[in-house]
Amino acid sequence: MQRRNILWTMFSSIGAAAVLAGVASRAKAASVDKAKVAYHLSDLDKVGFVLGNIQNHYDGMGGPDKVKINLVIHGPALKAFHSAQASPEFSQHVAQLAKTGLEMDACINTMKAQNVSLKELLPDFKVADKGAVVLLADLQSQGYVYLRP
């Protein structure tokens, strides 16, 4: 009789441990941060393509509450974001993405080379004050997935 009680206790403990492990696993999965993605943009001819990819990324992931996206821009692509050169439609599209949660960083080195200040770029930009490539490396070290369409 005592052997049966020992076996029952042992199997009950194993079952309880399995249930608790499942609960802990689900709790851990629920607390995982949202996906983080860094888009790298330097080609002027890819600006529209990349902005479309970003919108598709938000849509495909189920919205901005599921993914954090940072767009890092340097080189010729930054010219598209000069407020004096941007069309009203383009400016509106960029503003909508920013409202969605898109973070946009402009390379300080490119800004200097193009002789443009932050106030001359479209609203919601930040300056990558150590440069775009340094920021991209920093973002990757923070768990961001790197995409260069």
Image (cartoon, rainbow, N blue to C red):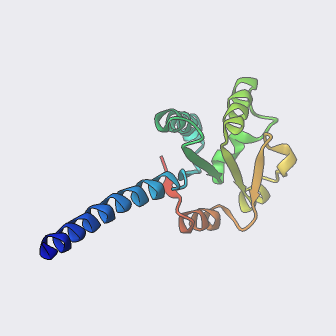
- x and y percentages locating residue 88 in the rendered image: 76, 25
Q: Which picture quadrant has residue 22?
A: bottom left
Q: Camera-side residue: 102 or 29?
A: 29
**Residue at the location (62% across, 49% down)?**
71
**Residue at the location (84% across, 44% down)?**
120
**Residue at the location (49% across, 51% down)?**
30
**Residue at the location (13% across, 75% down)?**
3
- x and y percentages locating residue 23 in the rendered image: 40, 56
Q: Residue 77, relative to residue 5: is it above or below?
A: above
Residue positioned most to the right: 119
Q: Residue 64, relative to residue 21: is it above or below?
A: above
Residue positioned most to the front: 1
- x and y percentages locating residue 54 in the rendered image: 55, 39
Q: In this rendering, would 64 be left or right of 16? A: right
Residue positioned most to the top: 89
Q: Which picture quadrant has residue 93?
A: top right
- x and y percentages locating residue 89 in the rendered image: 71, 24
Q: Residue 111, relative to residue 8: is it above or below?
A: above
Q: Give the number of marks.
A: 0
Q: Residue 79, relative to residue 3: is it above or below?
A: above
Q: Camera-side residue: 25 or 114?
A: 25
Give the quadrant of the N terminus. Answer: bottom left
Q: Camera-side residue: 37 or 10?
A: 10
